[in-house]
Every structure is written in structure tokens, then in C-alpha cells.
Amino acid sequence: MADPMHQFQIHKVVDLPTVNLPGLGVVDLSITNSVVSMGMAAGLICVFFALAARQAVVPGRLQSVGEMLYSLVDDLAGSIIGHEGKVFFPFVFTLFSFILAMNFLGMFLVFTATSQLAVTVTLAMLTILTVVVVGFARNGFGFFKLFVPSGVPAFLLILMVPIEIISFLVRPVTLALRLFGNMIGGHVVLKIFAGFIISLGLLASGGGIASLGYLGSAVSLGSVVALTALEFIVAFLQAFVFAALTCVYLNDVVNLHSH
Amino acid sequence: MANETTQTHESTGADGHASGGGLPQFQFVWWPGQVVWLLLIFVVLYVLLSKLFLPRVGGTIQTRADKIAADVAQARDLKTQAEAESATALAELAKARTHAQRTASEAKAKANAEAATRQAAEEAVLAEKLAVAEDRIRVSRDAALGNVRTIASDIAAAITDKLTGVAATADEVETALTAAKA
């Protein structure tokens, strides 16, 4: 049976020389399969919008899908952040579409970029740093009011403030691990069930009581089909959840005064 | 520096990879490259989306919303206009109807009056003719009644002539007739 973890193995596709980036040290910028996957996702988005961003008043199918995605994120940002959501809409949309494209590409290709912890951690840190930067830019040191819930008695604040600080610090971790866990879990389970089809089939070819293996093989095949459908939903849902949480976190700092 | 040592160490381990222990995601040798490329791609994608594609899609949606709003407003205007015109037409119709009714009643009255005058004239003519006829009848009757006396005196003269052989004189007959009549 193939190693279900093998699909996550990174290897170089194009060898590039290492670059000494200031502040980061020496970085090997070789094109790996992970980078190829990210690049394809970004390219896919660009090709999609190059085709979908027509300006017909009566939209075609592709244009409808493009506008649907636009409205989805626009409504999300608008309903959570309010009228200032427009400012953060491109950022949220880029996150959403990029994660969505990477998740979906993982359903068709052998490699899923969002199942790499490096990728999800980077996206989560990018989001949280954006939140922190926006928070300080908007509120100055009033940003720290985020950790002081209003309308709470002073003696409870001793308890509440540490909890709020911890909950804020945990945000990037949960953001990164949720996406990572969903993606890796789904793909590992798919791989394991797919492996069962073959191994149980081989076992059953031995004859005798082992012929029951064919039944297990069929059940595995059915599971793979069902799980594939589920994974498509998860791929969309996780991108949406990431975008929604980004909006929620941005809302916390943008509308800090109303807390 | 530390980075490089881990890289050489990890890459030997990764190439072997048969160990199976630990997730490939925790081979930290691959992290810096992924992070840098991801940020690079993300920035490029962000710029492309925010500067090029999203404004186009948003603009199209806005244009459509504006157009629909304008069309609806125009339709509403046209409806109001049509309603106003319909009201005007109804008013005109009502006016025309009253006018027609008045004309009709006037014509009817006129016709009635004419008929009445004509009838009166006819009746006058008829009455005149009736009077003339009645006069003629009266004259005829009077004449006939006058003749009765002559006939009576003639008959009386003839009877007296037959009975007595001497015809009574006109004076005698006259006297006798007057007496008989009385």
C-alpha cells in the first residue's frame, strides 16, 4: 500500500540558486511542487477573471460565476465589517480566491498547497499581521482596548484581560491549523480508502474466505466517491471560513470603538 | 547559518524518506522557500485582483444595478404618464358623453316641440275643416227643414184639391200649417 503521506512530500521541480534575503538569511528559492501548485492556483484565478470579467450587462455563465464569487465575498465583508468593508474587500477576496483555487487544484492534481503547514501558517500570519497593522493604524494604542471588554467590573478584568490576550494570540494558530487539518485529513483519508480498494482486492484474489475482500474493496470505492464529494464541499467551505474569520478579526479592530 | 545546517541534515533525511516517521510538512527545510514564494505570489495576485479584475467585475455589477434602477425608474415614469393620459382620456370621454347626451336631449326637445306645433297646426286645420263641414251640414239641414214646409203645403194643397175639388189657397194652407205646427 502506498504511503498516504507521500502526496505531501515536497521535491524540487526547478533548481534555482539560493538567495540571501535581508533579514531572512539564505533562502533556497528553488521551484518546488508546492510553489508550482501555488503558481498554478494564482494563474488559474487570473485566467478565470481574464475570461469572466466581461462587462456584459446580461452575463454569460462564466461571468455569472465570477460575479457570484465577487458578491459572495463583497456581502461577507459588507455584512461583517460594515461600510468600511470595501477597503478590505480586495484583501479578503484575494485570500478567499487563492485558498479556494489551491484547495480545488488539490482535488484534481496530486499536490495540495494548502495541506502544507508552511502555506497555511504564512496565510494566517499574513492575516493576523494585517489585523494588527490595521488595528494600530486606526486606533493607535487604543488597539489594546481590544483586550479590555467594556462593561465588565474591574475585578473581573484581572481574569478577562489574560483570556482575551490568549484568545487573540491563538487566532493565527487556529486559522492555520483549521485549514491545514481539514486539507491534510481529507486527502489522507481519501488516499487510505483508495489504498484499501487495491489491497483488499489483491487479498480477495487469493480465494476462499478472503473473497469477502471484494466486498470491502467495493465499500472502499463507494467511500472514496462519497468522500471526494465531501472534500469538494470542504475545499469551498474552508476557503469561505478563512475569509469570514479574516473579516471578523478585521471588524474587531476597524470598529473597535463600538465594542 | 543554523538554517543551512538543518537544510543539509534534513535533505539527506528527506531524500531517504522511507523512514515514514513524521509528516512531510514538518521538514522545515522547505519552509523558507514556500513562505517567500507564497508571499510573492500573494502580492502579485493581490495587485492584479485589486487593480485590474475586481474593479472590472464590481464596475459591471454597479453598471447593471444602475441600469436596472434607471430602467425601473423609466418604466415607473412611463406608467405614471400613461396613467395620467388614461385619466385625461377618461375625462374627455366623460365630457364627450355629457355633450352627446345634452345634444341628444336638446334634439329630442326640439323634435318634440316641432311635433307639437305641427300637431297643433294640423289640429287647427282639422278643426277648421270640421267647422266648415258642420256649417254645411247645418245649412243642408236647415234647407231640408225649409223644404219640408213647402212639401207639406204642396201636399196639403194637393190633398184638398183631391178631396174638395177646390185647391186651398196658399194663405189657408199657410195658416193651417202654422196652426198644426203649434
Image: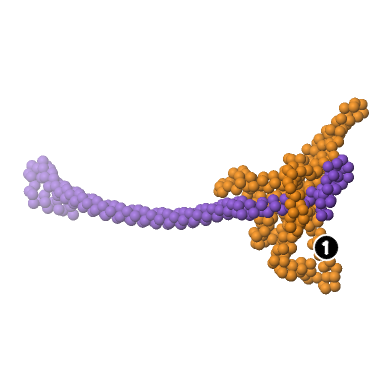
Looking at the image, residue B42 sits to the left or right of residue B177; the answer is: right
Looking at the image, residue B65 sits to the left or right of residue B34; the answer is: left
Residue B115: % across, % down: 29, 52
Chain painted in purple in the figure: B
**What residue is rendered at 72% in x and 69% in y?**
A140
- Which colour scheme appears in the figure? by chain
Residue at the far bottom in the pictured view: A154
**What residue is rendered at 83% in x and 34% in y?**
A197
Residue A60: % across, % down: 59, 44
Q: Is residue A60 visible?
A: yes
Compare residues A221 and B10 and report the one nearer the observer: B10
**Res. A248 image quadrant:** bottom right
Chain painted in orange in the figure: A
Residue A141: % across, % down: 74, 70
Q: Chain of mark 1?
A: A
Residue A230: % across, % down: 77, 43
**What residue is rendered at 66% in x and 55% in y?**
A90
The N terminus of chain B lies in quadrant: bottom right
Residue at the far top in the pictured view: A207
Q: Is residue B112 visible?
A: no
For label 1, the residue is A166
Label 1: how many residues lie within 10 Å, few (<14), some (14-19) or many (20+)?
A: few
**Res. A174 image quadrant:** bottom right
Compare residues A210 and A180 and report the one nearer the observer: A180
**What residue is rendered at 81% in x and 61% in y?**
A169
Compare residues A220 and A174 and report the one nearer the observer: A174
Q: Amino acid at mark 1?
A: Ile
SS type, badge 1: helix
The C terminus of chain B lies in quadrant: bottom left
Q: Count of labels shown?
A: 1
